[in-house]
């Protein structure tokens, strides 16, 4: 079976174990995802499956994408993601992948878009210590020197400076699946996952060992 699916972050809560301990969890709406396209080694050079999530109206879809869905005989989906697949899998266009792909105790990697923080200085973005706080200092939150002298006469690539913070692709690895509700397509994972509530995430079964 495919190793993952597309979902949406609902929010955080906590659940209680049988021995009375409470566990912080993130609630994810996992699927159902429709197989939009199956890619093969013969035609595309690799084995993969393209999944669609979150149905949308045809008038909201661009013409190229509308043609892509009509070719598969499916209704338009708002989000498309591609996942690798083994050649032995028999998935085809129109098949559905649901939350019952996961079981309690499984380990998953959750990929999402982190919250955007806008333009941030070096203290907030890179945790710089900052300058003296005493009266007369003019370097409280400034980054300090950023370049070399006449050699090499340029700012070194990768210098930590102020800039756009957040709004990037982030993966939380090796999270434990605490509960699965196939009827409501809900997966509860221990801990937090990247992104704001309502954000799109991709859940994949991790290939690494447990913590």
Image: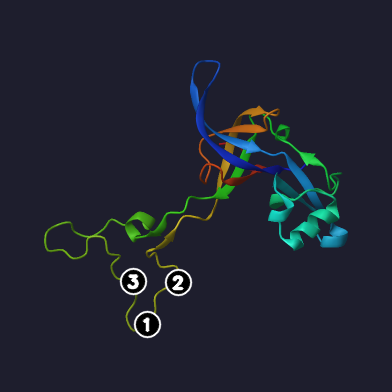
The image quadrant where one finds the N terminus is top right
Q: Is residue 191 visible?
A: yes
- Residue for badge 1: 153
Mark 2, secondary structure of its residue: loop
Q: Is residue 185 above or below residue 21?
A: below
Among the 4 quarters of the image, the one containing residue 10 = top right
- Residue for badge 2: 157
Which residue appears at 36% of the width and 82% of the height? Answer: 151
Q: Residues within 10 Å of mark 1 (few under 14, many from 20)?
A: few
Q: Residues within 10 Å of mark 2 (few under 14, many from 20)?
A: few
Residues at circles 1 and 2 in contact by the CB criterion of under 8 Å: no
Mark 3, secondary structure of its residue: loop
What is the residue that sits farthest to the front in this orientation? 59
How far apart are labels 1 and 3 at the CA level? Answer: 11 Å
Give me the disc on residue 78.
none
Residues at circles 1 and 3 in contact by the CB criterion of under 8 Å: no
How far apart are labels 3 and 2 at the CA level? Answer: 11 Å
Which residue appears at 50% of the width and 27% of the height? Answer: 14
- Residue for badge 3: 146
In the picture provided, is 211 more to the left or to the right than 95? left
């Amino acid at each position: 079976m495919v190793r993952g699916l597309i979902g949406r972050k609902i929010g955080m809560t906590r659940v209680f174990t049988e021995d009375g301990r409470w566990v912080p969890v993130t609630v994810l709406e996992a699927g159902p995802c429709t197989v939009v396209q199956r890619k093969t080694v013969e035609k595309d050079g690799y084995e993969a499956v393209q999944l669609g999530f979150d149905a949308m109206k045809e008038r909201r879809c661009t013409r190229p994408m509308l043609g892509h869905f009509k070719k598969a005989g499916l209704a338009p989906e708002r989000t498309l993601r591609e996942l690798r697949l083994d050649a032995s899998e028999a998935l085809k266009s129109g098949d559905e992948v649901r939350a019952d792909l996961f079981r309690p105790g499984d380990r998953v990697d959750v990929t999402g878009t982190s919250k955007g923080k806008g333009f941030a200085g070096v203290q907030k973005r890179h945790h710089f210590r900052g300058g003296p706080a005493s009266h007369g200092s003019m370097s409280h939150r400034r980054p300090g020197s950023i370049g070399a002298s006449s050699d090499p006469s340029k700012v070194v690539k990768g210098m930590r400076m102020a800039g756009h913070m957040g709004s990037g692709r982030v993966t939380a690895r090796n999270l434990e699946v605490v509960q699965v509700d196939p009827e409501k397509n809900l997966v509860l994972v221990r801990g937090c996952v990247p992104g704001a509530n309502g954000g799109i995430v991709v859940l994949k079964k991790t290939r690494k060992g447990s913590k």
